Amino acid sequence: MNDKAKTTDIATLLGELNGGQTEQMINRCLSDVAANVLTHGKKGRVAIVFDLSQIGESNQVNLEHTIIYTLPTKRGKRSEDYKTDTPVFVGAGGIMTMTPAEQIPMFPKVRQSSTED
């Protein structure tokens, strides 16, 4: 049984949140914290928090994503948080995607009739 098809694909979703900026910020935070952990020999932390709220009465939620990181310094630590939000569609079973599961084509296909001489 393939459960991945029945759940949100977090790798794809992370890459699309805030136009890809969220994924880049996670990459940057992880790298910065790891470098400072090695430099100063102290623990660091990167946390990702998701808060969801329904948008009106639609099948969309506002997905607020916050990256909180703490990196060690020579005499203590430095913390920051990066907070943005992205509207996402929610399909059957709670699967979140950037586009609706069944999107109506913007330009329907037009059948061309063939003419015989």
Image (tube, helix red, strand yellow):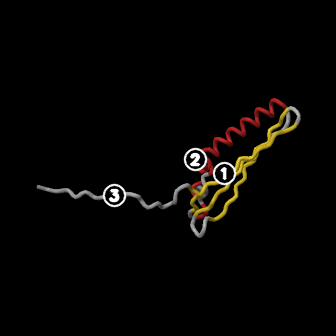
Say whether marks 2 and 3 touch (CB < 8 Å): no
For mark 3, give the secondary structure: loop
Mark pair 1, 2: CA separation: 11 Å
For mark 2, give the secondary structure: helix
- The residue that label 1 is drawn on is 84
Three-letter amino acid code at the position of disc 1: Thr
Three-letter amino acid code at the position of disc 2: Gly
- The quadrant where residue 71 appears: top right
Q: Residue at x 67, y 42 (%)?
A: 25
- Label 2: few (<14), some or many (≥20) within 10 Å? few
- The residue that label 2 is drawn on is 19
Specify whether residue 32 is in view: yes
Q: Is residue 37 left or right of residue 112?
A: right
Please say if 76 is above or below 7.
above
Residue 53 horizontal/vertical position (percent): 66, 63
Residue 76 horizontal/vertical position (percent): 87, 37
Give 3 or 24, whichever is nearer the viewer: 24
